[in-house]
Amino acid sequence: MPKQKTRKCAAKRLKKTGTGKYMHHRAGSRHLLTCKNAKRKRRLGKSVVVKDTEMRRIEAALPYGLK
């Protein structure tokens, strides 16, 4: 059987933690920042763990995981 391909878009956007969870950056921090308060902008700058409901899609996109 041939090897499976990794979805490169997922590989570039996600990072794997030591415990096996995946982290991603929050959306909404690129432009229109003047109308957002400082607390919201600080929160948007940090990475967060991928939700459990999305893990099946992530594991399908990354069949061999990340290095």
Image: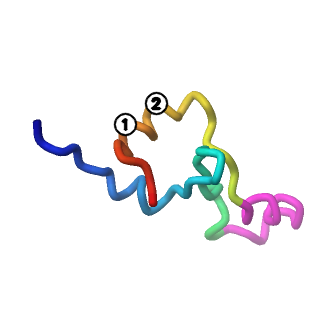
Expressed as whole percent of the image width and height from the top left, the position of residue 18 reads: 64, 53
Highlighted range, magenta: 32-46
Query: Could you tell me which quadrant the C terminus lies in?
Result: bottom left
Neighbourhood count class around disc 2 (C-alpha, 10 Å): few under 14, some 14–19, many 20 upward:
few
* Residue 62 lies in the magenta stretch: no
Does residue 6 appear left or right of residue 22 in this picture?
left
Q: Which mark is residue 39?
A: none
* Res. 45 image quadrant: bottom right
The residue to which callout 2 is attached is: 56
The residue to which callout 1 is attached is: 60
- The three-letter code of the residue at mark 1 reads Ala
Neighbourhood count class around disc 1 (C-alpha, 10 Å): few under 14, some 14–19, many 20 upward:
some
**CA–CA distance in space, label 1 to label 2:** 6 Å
Expressed as whole percent of the image width and height from the top left, the position of residue 57 reads: 43, 35
Tell me what residue is drawn at x 61 percent, y 52 percent.
23
Expressed as whole percent of the image width and height from the top left, the position of residue 42 reads: 82, 65
Does residue 37 appear left or right of residue 16 in this picture?
right
